[in-house]
Amino acid sequence: MKSWKYIIAFLVLTVVHPVWAQTSVPPSETPPNFKVAFIADQGLGKNAEAVLKLIKSEGAQTILHQGDFDYKNNPSAWEAQIDRILGADFPYFASIGNHDIKDWYGKEGYQEYLKNRLNRQEIKWDGDLGVKSSIRYKGIFIILVAPGELGYHHDVYIRDQLARDKSIWRICSWHKNMQLMQVGGKKDDTGWGVYEEARKGGAIIATAHDHSYGRSYPLSSFVNQTISSHSNRMVITEGRTFAFFSGLGGGGIHEQKLDEPWWAKVYTKTQNATYGALFGIFNVNGIPNKAMFYFKNINGEVIDHFNVTSTIHNNLVHKGNQQRKAHEIHS
């Protein structure tokens, strides 16, 4: 009689929770094939609009903007440009850029527009939005900070936030960079602390400031630029991650001035670059710790393409994958 009870229980689990029955892993909080667009250094007008239209046509479900919005100190015009193409309720997260400081705070400032957008969707955040803040959205933990621009101790904030978070995917977003973490004419602005704390916590590092695109190999030290792998199938761990700058949002394009071995891909005026966005697809085909990234320009050309596996807080995912493989072998 007991054996029949076990069989019935198994059948109920299979029908009601097929994913659990196959993998023993609860479904990810991140929807399958959830697409995020990364842009910065945007501006107003046809180039910026072309990038937003690209983002819409690619089916991105949110934007993560690494600062420098319109270069006109005109928050209402910037908001209107987004609304015309993506709509007033499109999820849009942003870190402050150096050209956004003058009209960041206060009534009808950039931050107020960003807060209102999140409030309309009942998205909660912690801290000073876009300056020293964090958001957990669709299972992805996003830290928005402003090293080298506003506030202090951003590295400590990143360390503390990542220590408390249990997400598989973490992204640290800020605008400026260190000279060796871009390929144009920018100088040391942020300090290495923010890079190192993000690396220690296994967070993807999203920056801009250099109006071009570049993506590093996975590094086990940013201070020393220590490459851990040259593969386009990257693995993120606590202590190893990659950084990128995606500054081709529409506000001009810079030439390449530095050529360093830790860059897996560089796309600048020197390579005849045009505007575009980096896209990240998370929970690829329902595998929570898998992501796929590609940079696409407004002409429809894919400039870069790479895959990422996260090993952060996903012991259950690994266990479930092993069980699924064993099931496939024996079936």
Image (cartoon, rainbow, N blue to C red):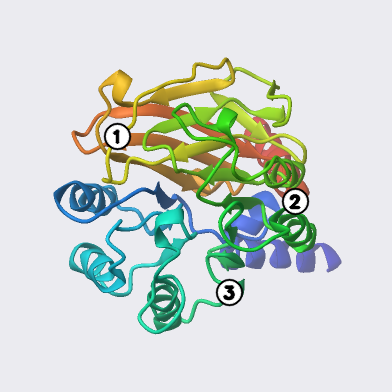
Secondary structure of the residue carrying numbered label 2 = loop
Q: Are there few (<14), some (14-19), or many (20+) residues within 10 Å of tag 2?
A: some
Secondary structure of the residue carrying numbered label 3 = loop
Q: Are there few (<14), some (14-19), or many (20+) residues within 10 Å of tag 3?
A: some
Quarter assignment of residue 195 = top right
Q: Amino acid at mark 1?
A: Ile
If you read the primary sequence from the N terminus, does the residue marked by circle 3 or circle 1 appear first? Answer: 3
Location of the C terminus (image quadrant)? top right
Location of the N terminus (image quadrant)? bottom right
Q: Which residue is mark 3?
A: 125
Measured as percent of width and height from the top left, residue 183 is found at 47, 26
Q: Which residue is mark 2?
A: 313
Please report the residue visible at 31 percent of the width from the left and 70 percent of the height from the top.
75
Q: Are there few (<14), some (14-19), or many (20+) residues within 10 Å of tag 1?
A: many
Please report the residue visible at 66 percent of the width from the left and 46 percent of the height from the top.
203
Measured as percent of width and height from the top left, residue 126 is found at 63, 74
Image height of 33 relative to 308, above or below: below
Measured as percent of width and height from the top left, residue 167 is found at 68, 57
Tag count: 3
Please report the residue visible at 28 percent of the width from the left and 70 percent of the height from the top.
79
Q: Which residue is mark 1?
A: 253
Please report the residue visible at 78 percent of the width from the left and 60 percent of the height from the top.
160
Measured as percent of width and height from the top left, residue 276 is found at 29, 40
Secondary structure of the residue carrying numbered label 1 = loop
Left/right of residue 119 with respect to residue 309 in the rendered view: left
Q: Nearer the viewer, mark 2 or mark 3?
A: 3
Q: Amino acid at mark 2?
A: His
Q: CA distance from mark 3 to mark 1?
A: 32 Å
If you read the primary sequence from the N terminus, does the residue marked by circle 2 or circle 1 appear first? Answer: 1
Quarter assignment of residue 91 = bottom left
Q: CA distance from mark 2 to mark 3?
A: 22 Å
Query: Of 271 and 229, which appears nearest the observer?
Result: 271
